[in-house]
Image (cartoon, rainbow, N blue to C red):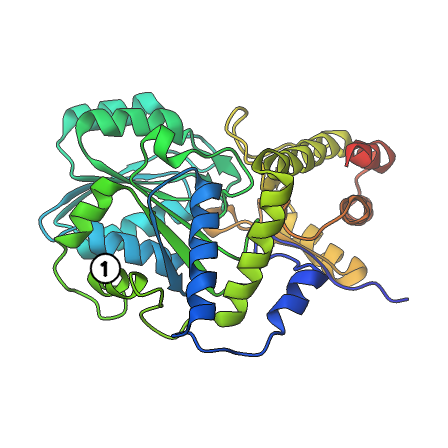
Amino acid sequence: MEKRDLLMIPGPVTVSEDVLEKMACQMFNHRGPRYAELLTEVSEGIAWSLGTKGEVHVVTGSGTAGLEFAQINCIHPGDRVLSLSNGVFGERLADMAKIFGKSIRVFEKPYGRGILAGDVKAELENGKYDVVTCVFNESSTAVRNPIKEIAKEVKKSGALLIVDNVSGLGMDYHMDEWGVDITITATQKALGVPPGLSFAAFSERAREKAKKAPTRSYYFDYGTYVKYREKGQPPFTPCISAMVATGHVLGKIRKTGLDAFNSLHSRRAEAVRKASREIGLPLFAQEGFRSDTLTAIEHPKSEEIREKMKTTHRVLLGGGQKHLAGKIFRIGNMGDISREDFERVFLALGDALRGAGENPNTENAIKAFGVL
């Protein structure tokens, strides 16, 4: 039997057969009781997965839509914003903030390095800010930022903290406990659902600010979402099939528990990191700040390696973005993937490295996946 393409990029991810079957449902009235029940189920499930008792809004659109929904309602025209950035998606948050706020300060760390709480403390002591934005899991570099520690410093300053957690589900995250005001996530990463929905969780403080937001968008107006949410309806036509699938996936995660869900990604990540070392390739992200939902690996011929793996073995990896193009490749740890899939990745990688004149220890690399 011919092998299928193996999608190992950081998202969208391979979707399991049971989720695909759920998405094949017939459409139903999004203004009726069935959708109202589904909306409650999904909203409560997302809140649970993020560790919050706050209000969750469902936005039909990619993760970027959810991020814009959060910023347009909680960054007001006179606000001063501190955008923390150490990768492509931190830069995206900053670019959005420049549209909505008055004065934007971008604090940058080199790609691959984590943002420290001390960095944030120093910035907040040097200026007064209304809002701080940060990415939890910077998927362009496979860096996990210490939001727990960052949030403590932001809270002391009185600023509102907006966190991009689009690719961070599958790792330990406690929105309320840590003091995060807004968290955005989406379907197409660790949830293992096709793209189409994003979710924005608001603390009480964020809700109060959003209520005072000037109307600057028809589609993303907070007041409209609140009005329809109270009726158990979406403000606009939703992606019904993705909602059904998300409800199904959240139900599965609830049954096994959040710890088991996070542990799965942790074990996958550790196995990939070990296999990378065994095959002789360095990890890109700073030690102590490495993501569990994807891994970034350095190689000076990364594009040639990726092309060989794709054309010869039908294994698809993520490439480097912006100035990292041709310098790293990224392996996603999310979605419907098995131990055999990881082994297939490193067998293909070993073959590509041999084709580049190297002598990789593929056999030892493969042994790393025995823990899965």
User: Residue 111's spot in the image, x, y percent?
Assistant: 44, 38
Name which residue lies at 49% across and 36% down: 143
Question: Identity of the amino acid at label 1?
Answer: Tyr
Choose between 191 and 330: the one closer to the eye.
191
Name which residue lies at 33% across and 28% down: 150
Q: Is residue 219 above or below residue 133?
A: below
Q: Is residue 173 left or right of residue 338?
A: left
Callout 1: 10 Å neighbours few (<14), some, many (20+)? many
Q: Say which quarter of the image contains residue 311.
A: bottom right
Residue 182 showing in the rendered view: yes
For mark 1, give the secondary structure. Answer: helix
Q: Say which quarter of the image contains residue 234.
A: bottom left
User: Residue 103's spot in the image, x, y percent?
Assistant: 14, 45
Quadrant showing the N terminus: bottom right
Choose between 235 and 291: the one closer to the eye.
235
Residue positioned most to the right: 1
Q: Label 1: which residue?
A: 222
User: Residue 32's spot in the image, x, y percent?
Assistant: 41, 74
User: Residue 114's spot in the image, x, y percent?
Assistant: 43, 30
Q: Is residue 32 left or right of residue 227?
A: right
Residue positioned most to the top: 118
Quadrant showing the C terminus: top right
Q: Is residue 352 left or right of residue 169?
A: right
Tally of numbered discs: 1
Residue positioned most to the front: 33
